[in-house]
Amino acid sequence: MADVAIRVTGLGKAYKQYPNRWSRLLEWIVPFSAQRHRQHWIMQGVDFEIARGQAVGIVGANGAGKSTLLKMITGTTQPTCGKIEVKGRVAALLELGMGFHPDFTGRQNAFMAGQLLGMQVEEIETLMPGIESFAEIGEAIDQPVRTYSSGMQMRLAFSVATARRPDILIVDEALSVGDAYFQHKSFERIRQYRQAGSTLLIVSHDRAAIQSICDSAILLKDGHMVLHSHPLEVLDYYHAMMAEREGQIVKQEALDTGEVRTISGTGEAGILNVRLLNADGRAVEVTEVGQPVVLQVEVEVRQDIERMVLGFMIKDRLGQAMYGINTHRLDQPLTDLAAGEKITYRFAFDMRLGTGNYSVSLSLSRLDSHLDRNFEWRDYGLVFHVINNRREDFVGCSWLDAQASIQRGDGQPNASITSQATP
């Protein structure tokens, strides 16, 4: 286990279910009598390894077993079967305010929580100024925790758990409680610890956080591990799975470029062709910053549909959303469609993205979201590249065509110089 920080083998968790309280009592009183309970398995057959210094995200619907898995890894819950090997000092932020006593002050709770993490009192005293500074709850640190908001509890809990860099940092969804400012601050500390060599295991519904921080992701469903792969592949599959309905397909296929495309939907309507056209109407895979383009999507209606909406999302190479729109938001839905109809959608816009590789995800649905009657959801419907040979050498993911006006006050009359960036 030299380079492995966490190894999970054949992990399973079950709880005893009794038909009534008397059955439980009888089983306790007469331990060698007939079994009066049945095993309710909430997790079975989970296997994975996390190398030292890696960051892994865990995703899944409510009840998939995410929190149970983290609790077993941290030792707060014991597995029914299987083996967990953890190497290194662990800091965990699981349930919000876990271990905090409501009648003790924030400072007193910080000392108690620090000791539960294995710190000595002297070490906590040394770290306390940093904990207070990072939490930014002011004089409330000396007030009872029962007077805290959930966001203040999260600030203090995270500050204590990360007061010193752990070998392994485990974070549940508690961070979602905090305000936007503290979430950014927290994830910045997590990134710093990652760069310093800490292993990270995180549960989050924030797709951007998983994609930007994690090396890989694990998808859980009904206590089983469905997928352990690159975050984009896992999140796209999870995205499709969340919209799953009776009779709906969810499949993945490898593209020539190496990406994995996820397609889901009922199949009542489908996408036939996707092209990016230049000003001459010619299909292109490479376009210039600022160049006018048209995204053309051909759709086939396979069953009678009362209402249909097409949407697209442009993502960068990390899967971060750059821009998305649909015909519902543009007040252009189609209604009363008959099987056999073919529709061509054209979205015209100027390519104001920065240089890089981008992909287009597409959605055919009944309303604004593909979660309502998902006819087809397709990731990597199109891949294109943006280059910059004609505009100023800007930095970032968006070209804003900024115009500069500069006035230099040197005491001379009309000493005004106006400079504008030339497109």
Image (cartoon, rainbow, N blue to C red):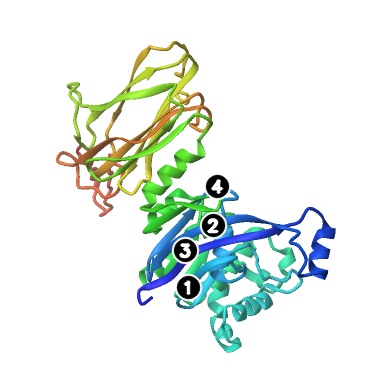
The percent position of residue 170, horizontal first and vertical second, equals 51, 66
Q: Is residue 274 left or right of residue 9?
A: left
- Tell me the tag on residue 229: none
CA gap, disc 1 to disc 4?
26 Å
> Which residue lies under the disc numbered 3?
201
CA gap, disc 2 to disc 3?
19 Å
The percent position of residue 48, horizontal first and vertical second, equals 43, 62
Amino acid type indicated by mark 4:
Ala
Which one is in front, 143 or 117?
117
Q: Earlier in the sequence, mark 2 or mark 1?
A: 2
User: In this view of the protein, can residue 159 be seen by the observer?
Assistant: no
* Residue drawn where x is 35% and y is 20% of the image: 299
CA gap, disc 3 to disc 4?
17 Å
- Tell me the tag on residue 61: 4
Q: Earlier in the sequence, mark 2 or mark 3?
A: 2
CA gap, disc 1 to disc 3?
14 Å
Q: Earlier in the sequence, mark 1 or mark 3?
A: 1
Amino acid type indicated by mark 3:
Leu
> Circle 4 sits in a helix, a strand or a loop, which is it?
loop
Which one is in front, 185 or 169?
169
Amino acid type indicated by mark 1:
Glu
